Image: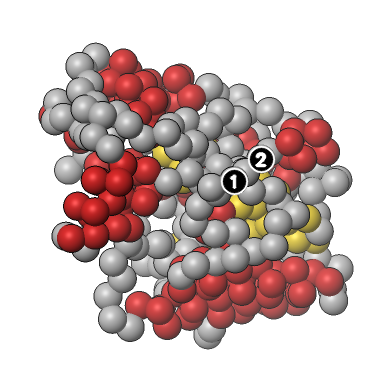
Amino acid sequence: MTRVLVTGATGFVGGALCETLARADYLVRGALRTDRAVPTAIAEKVIVGDINSTTDWTQALRGVDLVIHAAARSHVLHPAQGSADLYFETNDRGTERLANVATRMQVSRFIYLSSIKVNGEETPARAYTSADEPHPQDDYGLSKRRAEQHVAATAEHTGMEAVIVRPPLVYGPGVRANFLRLLRWVDHGWPLPLGAVRNARSLVNVWNLCDFLLLVLKHPDAPGRTWLVSDGEDLSTPDLIRRIGTAMGRRVRLPPVPVAFLQLSAALVGRRGELARLCGSLAVDITQTRTQLGWSPCVSVDEALARTVAWYLQGATP
């Protein structure tokens, strides 16, 4: 049985990924920061501590054929002082360390879960493609870009195959941050002054992302490339809110307040970043993914939203 090491194995994406891998008859080894109970999908667990430039990966990588590196220091909208170095220590130098040890332990393929923030924060003209020049706008995006470069360089000089995947916002049961905030807003029935917003944002549900990661574990054309993944349907923020409302059985109120007024108000209260994510466009083009890997999203947006809303309504949120 093929053994796969998953970092971030108990996280939002990692947990779903381990279940997907186990169903596909992979032997899943989870790399954990601290000792804890794990779901049955994780057949083996290894405690590695914090991921940084000195992490000892020897035990975790012993006997491993494939690695999916999903752990990261997550993006936050208002980072605390000193968080920049934490991004680089975990996402940049920590990934470099893991890739270097993986080659010494003869791992055959290394999948790095990066972020579309490597490309940038907004697509005012057209959707991003994997061929576009990276243009990260903050420390998080830059740390993920440098990690990509380490993985690619390590693979280039060794026999290890490397695959880089850049997803947009991921949603599904267990989602946090902005998407969870949207669920709460709709649930509470608050008027949301976003009816005049005309944007396009790509999302990827956790089931589609895990299905894609399962594919690139073994597809012969996946290594040596960067791949974009999404649900294949870009949504405006008002459309997303309406679809959440439909799935939740809630009435949605979207007053059409002019975007310029929203921008002025956000600037006055120091909330430009939050508004940009609600009003701006950030879309990805997955044509290359579809044509060259033969992949298509397996779960529709509406089905994924229904599953996510069901989780939310069951009281899975604090």
Q: Nearer the viewer, residue 182 or 124?
A: 124
Q: Secondary structure at mark 1?
A: loop
Bin the neighbour count of mark 2 within 10 Å (Cα to Cα): few under 14, some 14-19, many 20 and up. Answer: many
Q: Residue at x 77, y 74 (%)?
A: 153
Q: Secondary structure at mark 2?
A: loop
Left or right? Give the position of 200 relative to 133: left
Q: Quadrant of the N terminus?
A: top right
Q: Note whether 273 is above or below 216 in the view shown.
A: below
Q: Note whether 266 is above or below 245 in the view shown.
A: below
Rendering coords of residue 133 (x, y %): 69, 62
Which of the numbered marks, if any, corresponds to residue 125? 1
Q: Note whether 114 is above or below 102 in the view shown.
A: above
Rendering coords of residue 147 (x, y %): 61, 71
Marker count (numbered): 2
**Which residue position holds label 2?**
285
Left or right? Give the position of 33 relative to 56: left
User: Visible in this render: residue 111?
Assistant: no
Left or right? Give the position of 103 relative to 263: right
